[in-house]
Image (cartoon, coloured by chain):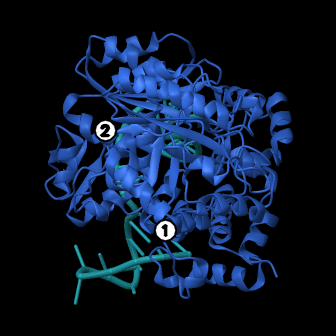
Chain colours: A blue, B cyan
Amino acid sequence: MVTIDKKDIIKLLEQIAIYLELKGENPFKISAYRKAALALETDQRSRNEIDDYTQIKGIGKGTATVIEEYLTTGQSETLRQLEQEVPAGLVPLLDLPGLGGKKLAQLYQELNVVDLTSLKKAAQAGEIASLKGFGQKSAEKILKAVEEVGQRPERLPVYEVMPISARVEAYLAELPKITRFSIAGSMRRFRETLKDLDYIIATDQPEQVKDALLALPDIKEVIAAGQTKVSVLLQGKYDVSVDFRIVTDDQFATTLHHFTGSKDHNVAMRQRAKAQGEKISEYGVENVETGEITTFATEADFFKHFNLNFIPPELREFSGEIEAFEQEIPLIEQADIQGDLHMHTTWSDGAQSIEEMVQLASELSYRYIAITDHSKFLRVANGLTEQRLREQRKEIERLRTVYPNINILCGVEMDIRPDGHLDFADDFLQEMDFVIGAIHSSFNQSEAEIMKRFVHAMENPYVKMIAHPTGRIIGKRSGYRANVEQLIDKAVETGTILELNANPKRFDLSADWVRIAQDKGAQIAINTDAHNKATLSYMTAGVRVARRGWLKAETVVNTWSLDRLTAFWRQKEDR
DNA sequence: GCCGTTTTCGGCCCGACTGTTTTCAGTCG
Protein backbone atom coordinates (compact mmCIF):
# COMPACT_ATOMS: atom_id res chain seq x y z
CA MET A 1 0.00 0.00 0.00
CA VAL A 2 1.45 3.31 -1.08
CA THR A 3 1.10 6.05 1.46
CA ILE A 4 -0.41 9.25 0.23
CA ASP A 5 0.62 12.40 2.04
CA LYS A 6 -0.76 15.90 1.97
CA LYS A 7 1.65 16.97 -0.76
CA ASP A 8 0.25 14.23 -3.01
CA ILE A 9 -3.27 15.52 -2.49
CA ILE A 10 -2.18 19.07 -3.25
CA LYS A 11 -0.48 17.83 -6.40
CA LEU A 12 -3.60 15.97 -7.47
CA LEU A 13 -5.79 19.04 -7.08
CA GLU A 14 -3.34 21.19 -8.98
CA GLN A 15 -3.13 18.59 -11.70
CA ILE A 16 -6.90 18.57 -12.04
CA ALA A 17 -6.88 22.36 -12.28
CA ILE A 18 -4.35 22.23 -15.10
CA TYR A 19 -6.41 19.76 -17.09
CA LEU A 20 -9.58 21.76 -16.53
CA GLU A 21 -7.74 24.79 -17.83
CA LEU A 22 -6.81 22.92 -20.98
CA LYS A 23 -10.42 21.89 -21.39
CA GLY A 24 -11.42 25.53 -21.29
CA GLU A 25 -13.58 24.94 -18.22
CA ASN A 26 -15.20 27.71 -16.21
CA PRO A 27 -12.26 29.73 -14.79
CA PHE A 28 -13.92 29.87 -11.38
CA LYS A 29 -14.12 26.12 -11.22
CA ILE A 30 -10.43 25.96 -12.08
CA SER A 31 -9.53 28.45 -9.43
CA ALA A 32 -11.74 26.58 -6.93
CA TYR A 33 -9.43 23.58 -7.29
CA ARG A 34 -6.38 25.81 -6.95
CA LYS A 35 -7.86 27.47 -3.89
CA ALA A 36 -8.55 24.08 -2.37
CA ALA A 37 -4.93 23.07 -2.95
CA LEU A 38 -3.76 26.31 -1.38
CA ALA A 39 -6.09 25.86 1.58
CA LEU A 40 -4.55 22.46 2.22
CA GLU A 41 -1.06 23.84 1.94
CA THR A 42 -1.83 26.62 4.39
CA ASP A 43 -3.42 24.27 6.89
CA GLN A 44 -0.76 23.38 9.45
CA ARG A 45 -2.10 19.88 10.11
CA SER A 46 -0.74 16.75 8.48
CA ARG A 47 -2.90 14.32 6.54
CA ASN A 48 -3.65 12.13 9.53
CA GLU A 49 -4.82 15.02 11.64
CA ILE A 50 -7.53 16.02 9.18
CA ASP A 51 -10.67 13.92 9.23
CA ASP A 52 -13.27 16.19 7.64
CA TYR A 53 -11.95 18.02 4.61
CA THR A 54 -15.13 20.04 4.11
CA GLN A 55 -14.31 21.81 7.38
CA ILE A 56 -11.47 23.57 5.61
CA LYS A 57 -12.52 26.85 4.05
CA GLY A 58 -12.20 26.53 0.30
CA ILE A 59 -12.94 22.82 0.23
CA GLY A 60 -16.54 21.80 -0.30
CA LYS A 61 -18.37 18.61 -0.93
CA GLY A 62 -17.10 18.11 -4.48
CA THR A 63 -13.41 18.47 -3.76
CA ALA A 64 -13.71 16.51 -0.53
CA THR A 65 -15.18 13.60 -2.49
CA VAL A 66 -12.25 13.73 -4.90
CA ILE A 67 -9.82 13.70 -1.98
CA GLU A 68 -11.58 10.86 -0.14
CA GLU A 69 -11.61 8.73 -3.26
CA TYR A 70 -7.92 9.37 -3.80
CA LEU A 71 -7.11 8.50 -0.21
CA THR A 72 -9.02 5.22 -0.23
CA THR A 73 -8.24 3.95 -3.73
CA GLY A 74 -4.98 5.74 -4.51
CA GLN A 75 -6.61 6.85 -7.75
CA SER A 76 -8.78 9.69 -8.90
CA GLU A 77 -11.55 9.01 -11.35
CA THR A 78 -11.88 12.75 -11.98
CA LEU A 79 -8.24 13.03 -13.02
CA ARG A 80 -8.34 9.77 -14.98
CA GLN A 81 -11.25 11.02 -17.06
CA LEU A 82 -9.57 14.34 -17.72
CA GLU A 83 -6.42 12.56 -18.84
CA GLN A 84 -8.51 10.67 -21.36
CA GLU A 85 -10.06 13.82 -22.71
CA VAL A 86 -6.92 15.94 -22.81
CA PRO A 87 -3.54 14.79 -24.20
CA ALA A 88 -0.89 14.89 -21.49
CA GLY A 89 1.58 16.46 -23.94
CA LEU A 90 -0.41 19.70 -23.84
CA VAL A 91 0.32 20.27 -20.14
CA PRO A 92 3.89 21.57 -20.46
CA LEU A 93 2.81 23.80 -23.34
CA LEU A 94 0.95 25.98 -20.83
CA ASP A 95 4.33 27.35 -19.82
CA LEU A 96 4.96 28.84 -23.25
CA PRO A 97 4.50 32.61 -23.21
CA GLY A 98 1.26 33.73 -24.80
CA LEU A 99 -0.39 30.34 -24.65
CA GLY A 100 -3.07 29.64 -22.09
CA GLY A 101 -5.67 26.94 -21.70
CA LYS A 102 -8.14 28.31 -24.19
CA LYS A 103 -5.73 28.83 -27.05
CA LEU A 104 -4.18 25.43 -26.49
CA ALA A 105 -7.62 23.82 -26.46
CA GLN A 106 -8.30 25.50 -29.78
CA LEU A 107 -4.99 24.35 -31.24
CA TYR A 108 -5.77 20.82 -30.08
CA GLN A 109 -9.27 20.76 -31.50
CA GLU A 110 -8.59 22.48 -34.81
CA LEU A 111 -5.02 21.47 -35.64
CA ASN A 112 -4.71 18.35 -33.52
CA VAL A 113 -1.79 19.77 -31.58
CA VAL A 114 -1.05 17.30 -28.78
CA ASP A 115 2.52 18.05 -27.73
CA LEU A 116 5.58 20.16 -28.43
CA THR A 117 6.44 18.29 -31.64
CA SER A 118 3.03 18.68 -33.22
CA LEU A 119 2.86 22.32 -32.13
CA LYS A 120 6.19 22.95 -33.78
CA LYS A 121 5.03 21.25 -36.95
CA ALA A 122 1.82 23.25 -37.09
CA ALA A 123 3.73 26.46 -36.47
CA GLN A 124 6.34 25.73 -39.14
CA ALA A 125 3.66 24.74 -41.66
CA GLY A 126 2.06 28.15 -41.17
CA GLU A 127 -1.27 26.68 -40.11
CA ILE A 128 -1.64 28.75 -36.97
CA ALA A 129 -1.96 32.21 -38.44
CA SER A 130 -5.23 31.38 -40.21
CA LEU A 131 -7.05 30.22 -37.07
CA LYS A 132 -9.73 32.49 -35.72
CA GLY A 133 -8.34 34.58 -32.92
CA PHE A 134 -4.77 33.98 -34.02
CA GLY A 135 -2.82 35.94 -36.58
CA GLN A 136 0.58 36.43 -38.12
CA LYS A 137 2.11 37.82 -34.96
CA SER A 138 0.86 35.15 -32.60
CA ALA A 139 2.00 32.47 -35.06
CA GLU A 140 5.51 33.96 -35.08
CA LYS A 141 5.51 34.27 -31.30
CA ILE A 142 4.57 30.64 -30.88
CA LEU A 143 7.21 29.45 -33.31
CA LYS A 144 9.82 31.45 -31.47
CA ALA A 145 8.69 30.14 -28.10
CA VAL A 146 8.75 26.56 -29.35
CA GLU A 147 12.26 26.95 -30.64
CA GLU A 148 13.52 28.50 -27.41
CA VAL A 149 11.97 25.91 -25.15
CA GLY A 150 14.38 24.47 -22.61
CA GLN A 151 16.99 27.15 -23.23
CA ARG A 152 16.38 28.77 -19.88
CA PRO A 153 15.15 27.28 -16.64
CA GLU A 154 11.71 28.54 -15.77
CA ARG A 155 12.83 30.13 -12.55
CA LEU A 156 16.31 31.49 -11.95
CA PRO A 157 18.06 31.28 -8.58
CA VAL A 158 18.06 34.67 -6.91
CA TYR A 159 21.87 34.84 -7.01
CA GLU A 160 21.78 34.82 -10.81
CA VAL A 161 19.42 37.78 -10.82
CA MET A 162 20.88 39.90 -8.01
CA PRO A 163 23.61 41.47 -10.19
CA ILE A 164 21.10 42.30 -12.94
CA SER A 165 18.81 43.87 -10.40
CA ALA A 166 21.71 45.95 -9.09
CA ARG A 167 22.47 47.15 -12.61
CA VAL A 168 18.89 48.19 -13.32
CA GLU A 169 18.69 49.97 -9.99
CA ALA A 170 21.88 51.91 -10.71
CA TYR A 171 20.38 52.96 -14.04
CA LEU A 172 17.08 54.06 -12.49
CA ALA A 173 18.88 56.02 -9.79
CA GLU A 174 20.45 58.18 -12.51
CA LEU A 175 17.21 59.00 -14.33
CA PRO A 176 16.26 62.63 -13.63
CA LYS A 177 12.50 62.44 -14.24
CA ILE A 178 11.87 59.83 -11.57
CA THR A 179 10.33 60.90 -8.26
CA ARG A 180 10.92 57.56 -6.57
CA PHE A 181 11.20 53.91 -7.52
CA SER A 182 11.34 50.51 -5.90
CA ILE A 183 11.95 46.91 -6.70
CA ALA A 184 8.74 44.87 -6.40
CA GLY A 185 7.67 41.32 -7.13
CA SER A 186 9.31 38.17 -5.82
CA MET A 187 12.72 39.86 -5.71
CA ARG A 188 11.37 42.29 -3.13
CA ARG A 189 9.87 39.39 -1.22
CA PHE A 190 13.28 37.75 -1.65
CA ARG A 191 12.19 34.38 -2.88
CA GLU A 192 14.90 31.82 -3.60
CA THR A 193 14.08 31.66 -7.28
CA LEU A 194 12.58 34.25 -9.59
CA LYS A 195 10.91 34.45 -12.95
CA ASP A 196 11.43 38.11 -13.66
CA LEU A 197 12.14 41.49 -12.10
CA ASP A 198 9.52 44.15 -11.35
CA TYR A 199 10.02 47.84 -10.68
CA ILE A 200 7.55 50.54 -9.75
CA ILE A 201 8.41 54.05 -10.85
CA ALA A 202 6.69 57.26 -9.75
CA THR A 203 6.94 60.20 -12.12
CA ASP A 204 4.95 63.07 -13.60
CA GLN A 205 6.77 62.65 -16.91
CA PRO A 206 5.69 59.15 -17.97
CA GLU A 207 6.57 59.59 -21.65
CA GLN A 208 10.17 60.59 -20.94
CA VAL A 209 10.59 57.82 -18.41
CA LYS A 210 9.23 55.31 -20.88
CA ASP A 211 11.73 56.45 -23.52
CA ALA A 212 14.55 56.28 -21.00
CA LEU A 213 13.60 52.75 -20.03
CA LEU A 214 13.60 51.67 -23.65
CA ALA A 215 17.17 52.95 -23.81
CA LEU A 216 18.37 50.56 -21.10
CA PRO A 217 21.56 48.80 -22.15
CA ASP A 218 21.39 45.14 -23.19
CA ILE A 219 17.75 45.07 -24.24
CA LYS A 220 17.24 42.01 -26.38
CA GLU A 221 13.56 42.48 -26.95
CA VAL A 222 10.80 44.91 -26.07
CA ILE A 223 7.83 42.86 -24.93
CA ALA A 224 5.45 45.69 -24.06
CA ALA A 225 5.68 49.44 -24.19
CA GLY A 226 2.40 50.87 -23.00
CA GLN A 227 1.33 53.98 -21.07
CA THR A 228 1.90 52.49 -17.65
CA LYS A 229 3.83 49.35 -18.37
CA VAL A 230 7.16 48.78 -20.05
CA SER A 231 8.43 45.25 -20.29
CA VAL A 232 11.79 44.28 -21.74
CA LEU A 233 13.96 41.21 -22.03
CA LEU A 234 17.51 41.88 -20.86
CA GLN A 235 20.29 39.88 -22.41
CA GLY A 236 22.83 38.20 -20.17
CA LYS A 237 24.04 34.78 -19.10
CA TYR A 238 20.33 34.11 -18.84
CA ASP A 239 17.80 36.42 -20.44
CA VAL A 240 15.72 38.07 -17.74
CA SER A 241 12.49 39.87 -18.36
CA VAL A 242 12.04 43.14 -16.48
CA ASP A 243 8.69 44.84 -15.98
CA PHE A 244 8.39 48.52 -15.14
CA ARG A 245 5.14 50.08 -13.93
CA ILE A 246 4.98 53.83 -14.38
CA VAL A 247 2.56 55.63 -12.07
CA THR A 248 1.98 58.99 -10.43
CA ASP A 249 3.47 59.57 -7.02
CA ASP A 250 0.15 59.29 -5.18
CA GLN A 251 -0.46 55.87 -6.73
CA PHE A 252 3.03 54.66 -5.87
CA ALA A 253 2.30 52.98 -2.53
CA THR A 254 -0.71 50.97 -3.72
CA THR A 255 0.99 50.00 -6.96
CA LEU A 256 4.06 48.91 -5.03
CA HIS A 257 1.92 46.78 -2.76
CA HIS A 258 0.02 45.32 -5.68
CA PHE A 259 3.08 44.30 -7.65
CA THR A 260 5.04 43.11 -4.64
CA GLY A 261 2.42 40.43 -4.18
CA SER A 262 2.33 37.63 -3.61
CA LYS A 263 -0.79 37.02 -5.57
CA ASP A 264 -2.33 35.08 -2.71
CA HIS A 265 -1.45 37.83 -0.25
CA ASN A 266 -3.16 40.35 -2.51
CA VAL A 267 -6.28 38.27 -2.85
CA ALA A 268 -6.51 38.02 0.92
CA MET A 269 -5.97 41.76 1.31
CA ARG A 270 -8.75 42.44 -1.18
CA GLN A 271 -11.07 40.19 0.72
CA ARG A 272 -10.26 42.16 3.85
CA ALA A 273 -11.01 45.37 1.95
CA LYS A 274 -14.26 44.00 0.66
CA ALA A 275 -15.39 43.19 4.17
CA GLN A 276 -15.14 46.89 4.99
CA GLY A 277 -16.86 47.98 1.79
CA GLU A 278 -13.74 48.80 -0.17
CA LYS A 279 -11.94 47.68 -3.28
CA ILE A 280 -8.17 47.56 -3.69
CA SER A 281 -6.54 48.16 -7.02
CA GLU A 282 -3.03 49.24 -7.88
CA TYR A 283 -4.27 52.83 -8.10
CA GLY A 284 -5.75 53.11 -4.67
CA VAL A 285 -8.49 51.96 -2.37
CA GLU A 286 -11.99 52.65 -3.60
CA ASN A 287 -15.02 53.10 -1.42
CA VAL A 288 -17.53 50.92 -3.22
CA GLU A 289 -20.48 53.08 -2.23
CA THR A 290 -19.14 56.54 -3.02
CA GLY A 291 -16.57 55.60 -5.64
CA GLU A 292 -14.10 57.77 -3.80
CA ILE A 293 -10.48 56.68 -4.16
CA THR A 294 -7.98 56.93 -1.32
CA THR A 295 -4.25 56.90 -1.99
CA PHE A 296 -1.38 56.63 0.45
CA ALA A 297 2.03 58.18 0.87
CA THR A 298 3.59 54.90 1.97
CA GLU A 299 2.78 51.21 2.18
CA ALA A 300 2.75 51.58 5.98
CA ASP A 301 -0.17 54.02 5.63
CA PHE A 302 -1.89 51.61 3.30
CA PHE A 303 -1.68 48.79 5.85
CA LYS A 304 -2.74 51.15 8.61
CA HIS A 305 -5.91 51.87 6.66
CA PHE A 306 -6.78 48.21 7.11
CA ASN A 307 -5.85 48.25 10.80
CA LEU A 308 -2.64 46.39 10.17
CA ASN A 309 0.95 47.02 11.04
CA PHE A 310 3.41 47.22 8.17
CA ILE A 311 3.85 43.71 6.81
CA PRO A 312 7.44 43.27 5.65
CA PRO A 313 7.56 42.25 1.96
CA GLU A 314 9.41 39.05 2.86
CA LEU A 315 6.35 37.78 4.70
CA ARG A 316 3.73 38.46 2.07
CA GLU A 317 3.20 34.87 1.07
CA PHE A 318 -0.25 34.32 2.53
CA SER A 319 1.05 32.23 5.38
CA GLY A 320 -0.75 33.89 8.23
CA GLU A 321 0.82 37.34 7.92
CA ILE A 322 -2.40 39.31 7.59
CA GLU A 323 -3.98 38.17 10.85
CA ALA A 324 -0.61 38.12 12.60
CA PHE A 325 0.18 41.74 11.80
CA GLU A 326 -2.92 43.02 13.52
CA GLN A 327 -0.30 42.94 16.29
CA GLU A 328 3.18 44.31 15.98
CA ILE A 329 5.83 41.67 15.31
CA PRO A 330 9.43 42.84 15.39
CA LEU A 331 11.57 40.76 13.04
CA ILE A 332 15.32 40.55 12.99
CA GLU A 333 17.09 43.39 11.18
CA GLN A 334 20.56 43.76 9.76
CA ALA A 335 21.45 46.17 12.58
CA ASP A 336 20.83 43.44 15.16
CA ILE A 337 23.74 41.37 13.87
CA GLN A 338 26.73 41.45 16.24
CA GLY A 339 29.05 39.01 14.55
CA ASP A 340 29.69 36.30 12.00
CA LEU A 341 30.49 32.78 13.16
CA HIS A 342 31.60 31.07 9.97
CA MET A 343 34.34 32.22 7.61
CA HIS A 344 37.46 30.92 5.89
CA THR A 345 40.94 32.28 5.33
CA THR A 346 44.04 31.45 3.31
CA TRP A 347 44.86 28.88 6.01
CA SER A 348 42.39 26.58 4.25
CA ASP A 349 40.46 27.48 1.11
CA GLY A 350 39.74 31.17 1.70
CA ALA A 351 41.18 34.02 -0.34
CA GLN A 352 41.97 36.47 2.45
CA SER A 353 44.36 36.35 5.38
CA ILE A 354 42.99 36.25 8.92
CA GLU A 355 44.03 39.84 9.41
CA GLU A 356 42.17 40.98 6.29
CA MET A 357 39.01 39.24 7.47
CA VAL A 358 39.37 40.86 10.89
CA GLN A 359 39.78 44.29 9.32
CA LEU A 360 36.73 43.81 7.14
CA ALA A 361 34.65 42.59 10.04
CA SER A 362 35.72 45.64 12.04
CA GLU A 363 34.53 47.86 9.22
CA LEU A 364 31.15 46.14 9.52
CA SER A 365 31.24 47.10 13.24
CA TYR A 366 30.96 43.49 14.36
CA ARG A 367 31.69 42.77 18.01
CA TYR A 368 33.02 39.30 17.29
CA ILE A 369 33.87 36.85 14.54
CA ALA A 370 34.89 33.21 14.43
CA ILE A 371 37.67 32.09 12.13
CA THR A 372 36.49 28.65 11.05
CA ASP A 373 38.71 27.03 8.47
CA HIS A 374 38.19 23.46 7.32
CA SER A 375 39.56 20.49 9.23
CA LYS A 376 42.12 17.92 8.09
CA PHE A 377 39.69 15.42 6.54
CA LEU A 378 38.86 17.91 3.80
CA ARG A 379 42.13 17.61 1.87
CA VAL A 380 40.80 19.38 -1.24
CA ALA A 381 40.21 22.47 0.85
CA ASN A 382 43.58 22.26 2.56
CA GLY A 383 41.94 21.33 5.85
CA LEU A 384 43.86 22.07 9.06
CA THR A 385 45.44 19.53 11.41
CA GLU A 386 45.53 19.93 15.18
CA GLN A 387 49.06 21.21 14.80
CA ARG A 388 48.15 23.91 12.28
CA LEU A 389 45.11 24.98 14.27
CA ARG A 390 47.40 25.54 17.25
CA GLU A 391 49.64 27.65 15.07
CA GLN A 392 46.63 29.54 13.82
CA ARG A 393 45.67 30.30 17.41
CA LYS A 394 49.03 32.04 17.91
CA GLU A 395 48.35 34.27 14.92
CA ILE A 396 44.86 35.03 16.22
CA GLU A 397 46.27 35.88 19.65
CA ARG A 398 48.66 38.31 18.00
CA LEU A 399 45.78 39.95 16.09
CA ARG A 400 43.71 40.27 19.26
CA THR A 401 46.25 42.75 20.57
CA VAL A 402 46.25 44.68 17.29
CA TYR A 403 42.44 44.84 17.02
CA PRO A 404 41.17 45.16 20.58
CA ASN A 405 37.70 46.31 19.50
CA ILE A 406 36.67 43.00 18.04
CA ASN A 407 36.69 39.56 19.60
CA ILE A 408 38.27 36.90 17.41
CA LEU A 409 37.30 33.32 18.16
CA CYS A 410 39.53 30.39 17.28
CA GLY A 411 37.07 28.18 15.49
CA VAL A 412 37.01 25.31 13.07
CA GLU A 413 34.54 23.92 10.58
CA MET A 414 35.15 20.31 11.48
CA ASP A 415 34.19 17.51 9.16
CA ILE A 416 31.78 14.84 10.25
CA ARG A 417 33.36 11.91 8.45
CA PRO A 418 31.37 9.38 6.40
CA ASP A 419 31.39 6.81 9.19
CA GLY A 420 30.11 9.41 11.66
CA HIS A 421 33.43 9.95 13.42
CA LEU A 422 34.42 13.51 14.12
CA ASP A 423 37.64 14.77 12.62
CA PHE A 424 39.11 15.61 16.06
CA ALA A 425 39.08 13.97 19.47
CA ASP A 426 37.36 15.64 22.41
CA ASP A 427 40.53 16.62 24.23
CA PHE A 428 41.59 18.63 21.24
CA LEU A 429 38.12 20.06 20.61
CA GLN A 430 38.03 21.55 24.08
CA GLU A 431 41.02 23.71 23.19
CA MET A 432 38.90 25.44 20.55
CA ASP A 433 36.68 28.45 21.23
CA PHE A 434 34.04 27.37 18.74
CA VAL A 435 33.50 24.14 16.84
CA ILE A 436 31.19 23.74 13.84
CA GLY A 437 30.16 20.29 12.65
CA ALA A 438 29.60 19.91 8.91
CA ILE A 439 29.19 17.28 6.23
CA HIS A 440 31.25 17.60 3.05
CA SER A 441 31.45 13.98 1.91
CA SER A 442 29.39 10.92 0.99
CA PHE A 443 26.36 12.96 -0.01
CA ASN A 444 24.72 9.84 -1.37
CA GLN A 445 24.26 8.08 1.93
CA SER A 446 20.82 7.01 3.09
CA GLU A 447 18.83 9.25 5.39
CA ALA A 448 19.63 6.95 8.30
CA GLU A 449 23.38 7.19 7.68
CA ILE A 450 23.33 10.96 7.24
CA MET A 451 21.26 11.41 10.38
CA LYS A 452 23.51 9.10 12.35
CA ARG A 453 26.40 11.42 11.48
CA PHE A 454 24.50 14.54 12.49
CA VAL A 455 23.15 13.07 15.70
CA HIS A 456 26.59 11.89 16.75
CA ALA A 457 28.02 15.35 16.11
CA MET A 458 25.22 17.12 17.94
CA GLU A 459 25.59 14.89 20.96
CA ASN A 460 29.21 15.94 21.31
CA PRO A 461 29.42 18.69 23.95
CA TYR A 462 32.02 20.64 21.99
CA VAL A 463 30.18 20.80 18.67
CA LYS A 464 28.23 24.00 19.07
CA MET A 465 26.72 24.40 15.64
CA ILE A 466 25.80 22.44 12.51
CA ALA A 467 26.68 24.30 9.31
CA HIS A 468 24.63 24.16 6.06
CA PRO A 469 22.36 21.41 7.44
CA THR A 470 21.02 20.15 4.09
CA GLY A 471 23.99 20.82 1.81
CA ARG A 472 21.82 21.99 -1.04
CA ILE A 473 22.91 24.35 -3.81
CA ILE A 474 19.85 26.14 -5.12
CA GLY A 475 19.07 25.18 -8.69
CA LYS A 476 22.04 22.76 -8.82
CA ARG A 477 21.82 20.00 -6.26
CA SER A 478 19.28 19.10 -3.64
CA GLY A 479 21.79 18.22 -0.92
CA TYR A 480 22.09 15.18 1.29
CA ARG A 481 19.17 13.25 2.74
CA ALA A 482 18.87 15.13 5.99
CA ASN A 483 15.67 14.68 7.94
CA VAL A 484 15.40 18.32 8.91
CA GLU A 485 12.51 17.87 11.30
CA GLN A 486 14.51 15.32 13.27
CA LEU A 487 17.59 17.52 13.04
CA ILE A 488 15.70 20.45 14.56
CA ASP A 489 14.35 18.31 17.40
CA LYS A 490 17.84 17.04 18.15
CA ALA A 491 19.24 20.57 18.02
CA VAL A 492 16.70 21.71 20.61
CA GLU A 493 17.40 18.69 22.79
CA THR A 494 21.19 19.09 22.73
CA GLY A 495 21.41 22.88 22.65
CA THR A 496 23.14 22.84 19.29
CA ILE A 497 22.80 25.86 17.00
CA LEU A 498 21.62 25.38 13.43
CA GLU A 499 23.07 27.55 10.70
CA LEU A 500 21.25 29.66 8.21
CA ASN A 501 23.99 29.90 5.61
CA ALA A 502 23.74 33.38 4.07
CA ASN A 503 25.41 32.40 0.82
CA PRO A 504 22.65 33.01 -1.77
CA LYS A 505 23.59 29.78 -3.48
CA ARG A 506 22.81 27.89 -0.30
CA PHE A 507 20.35 29.71 2.00
CA ASP A 508 20.48 26.55 4.01
CA LEU A 509 18.41 26.11 6.19
CA SER A 510 15.69 27.64 4.08
CA ALA A 511 13.18 30.21 5.29
CA ASP A 512 10.46 27.59 5.75
CA TRP A 513 12.73 25.46 7.89
CA VAL A 514 14.04 28.24 10.12
CA ARG A 515 10.45 29.24 10.77
CA ILE A 516 9.70 25.74 11.97
CA ALA A 517 12.97 25.67 13.92
CA GLN A 518 12.03 28.88 15.72
CA ASP A 519 8.60 27.50 16.58
CA LYS A 520 10.22 24.43 18.06
CA GLY A 521 12.58 26.52 20.15
CA ALA A 522 15.84 25.99 18.25
CA GLN A 523 18.59 28.61 18.02
CA ILE A 524 19.79 29.81 14.63
CA ALA A 525 23.01 31.50 13.56
CA ILE A 526 23.12 33.50 10.33
CA ASN A 527 26.62 33.12 8.90
CA THR A 528 28.22 34.13 5.64
CA ASP A 529 30.61 31.17 5.30
CA ALA A 530 32.73 33.84 3.56
CA HIS A 531 35.68 32.64 1.53
CA ASN A 532 36.76 36.13 0.51
CA LYS A 533 36.22 39.80 1.13
CA ALA A 534 33.13 40.29 -1.00
CA THR A 535 31.18 37.39 0.44
CA LEU A 536 31.29 38.79 3.98
CA SER A 537 28.50 41.06 2.79
CA TYR A 538 26.18 38.10 2.25
CA MET A 539 24.93 38.78 5.77
CA THR A 540 22.33 41.18 4.37
CA ALA A 541 20.86 38.45 2.19
CA GLY A 542 20.93 35.98 5.07
CA VAL A 543 19.00 38.37 7.28
CA ARG A 544 16.36 38.71 4.60
CA VAL A 545 15.93 34.94 4.42
CA ALA A 546 15.63 34.91 8.20
CA ARG A 547 12.89 37.52 7.91
CA ARG A 548 11.11 35.35 5.35
CA GLY A 549 11.22 32.72 8.07
CA TRP A 550 9.65 35.15 10.57
CA LEU A 551 12.77 35.05 12.76
CA LYS A 552 13.01 37.37 15.70
CA ALA A 553 16.39 38.69 16.79
CA GLU A 554 16.12 36.64 19.96
CA THR A 555 16.20 33.37 17.97
CA VAL A 556 19.40 34.31 16.19
CA VAL A 557 22.45 33.80 18.38
CA ASN A 558 24.70 36.18 16.52
CA THR A 559 22.50 39.06 17.64
CA TRP A 560 23.52 38.20 21.20
CA SER A 561 26.48 39.56 23.11
CA LEU A 562 29.54 37.32 23.14
CA ASP A 563 29.08 36.81 26.89
CA ARG A 564 25.61 35.47 26.44
CA LEU A 565 26.76 33.31 23.56
CA THR A 566 29.61 31.73 25.51
CA ALA A 567 27.29 31.15 28.47
CA PHE A 568 24.95 29.32 26.11
CA TRP A 569 27.82 27.18 24.89
CA ARG A 570 28.94 26.43 28.44
CA GLN A 571 25.47 25.10 29.18
CA LYS A 572 25.87 22.50 26.46
CA GLU A 573 29.25 21.40 27.85
CA ASP A 574 27.76 21.10 31.35
CA ARG A 575 24.80 18.95 30.34
C1' DG B 1 -16.47 24.17 -7.48
C1' DC B 2 -17.23 27.18 -3.22
C1' DC B 3 -19.71 30.26 -0.45
C1' DG B 4 -23.40 32.96 2.22
C1' DT B 5 -26.82 37.20 9.47
C1' DT B 6 -27.58 41.54 3.04
C1' DT B 7 -27.72 36.07 -0.81
C1' DT B 8 -29.04 28.70 -1.59
C1' DC B 9 -28.27 31.91 -6.77
C1' DG B 10 -24.99 34.63 -8.50
C1' DG B 11 -21.16 36.17 -7.53
C1' DC B 12 -16.11 34.78 -7.39
C1' DC B 13 -9.71 40.33 -7.32
C1' DC B 14 -8.49 43.69 -10.65
C1' DG B 15 -6.55 45.96 -14.54
C1' DA B 16 -3.11 46.54 -18.58
C1' DC B 17 -1.37 45.11 -22.93
C1' DT B 18 -1.47 42.69 -27.25
C1' DG B 19 -3.35 41.05 -31.20
C1' DT B 20 -7.07 40.52 -33.71
C1' DT B 21 -10.75 42.78 -33.54
C1' DT B 22 -14.45 46.94 -35.31
C1' DT B 23 -15.82 46.27 -29.42
C1' DC B 24 -13.17 42.31 -27.33
C1' DA B 25 -10.90 37.84 -25.79
C1' DG B 26 -6.95 35.87 -23.98
C1' DT B 27 -3.05 36.16 -21.24
C1' DC B 28 -0.42 37.84 -17.59
C1' DG B 29 0.83 39.38 -13.12
> Label 1's element?
loop
A529 sits left or right of A75 in the view: left
- Tag 1 subunit: A
- Residue A278 % position (x, y): 22, 57
Question: Which quadrant holds residue B13?
Answer: bottom left
Q: Residue A129, can we see it?
A: no
B22 sits left or right of A108 in the view: left
Circle 2 packing at 10 Å, graded few (<14), some (14-19), many (20+), is many
Quarter the N terminus of chain A occupies:
bottom right
Of pointers 1 and 2, the one earlier in the residue sequence = 2
- Residue A412 % position (x, y): 58, 40
- Tag 2 subunit: A
Question: Which quadrant holds residue A144?
Answer: top right
Q: Residue A275, can we see it?
A: yes
Query: How far is the residue under mark 1 from the one under mark 2?
Result: 54 Å
Find residue A575 and name its label: 1
Q: Quickly name the residue at label 2.
A: A255
A478 sits left or right of A527 in the view: right
Q: What amino acid is at disc 1?
A: Arg
Find residue A16 and name its label: none
- Judge if badges 1 and 2 mark residues of a common chain: yes
Q: Are marks 1 and 2 in contact (CB under 8 Å)?
A: no
> Label 2's element?
helix
A562 sits left or right of A390 in the view: left
Residue at 17 percent of width and 52 percent of height: A304
Residue at 47 percent of width and 73 percent of height: A58
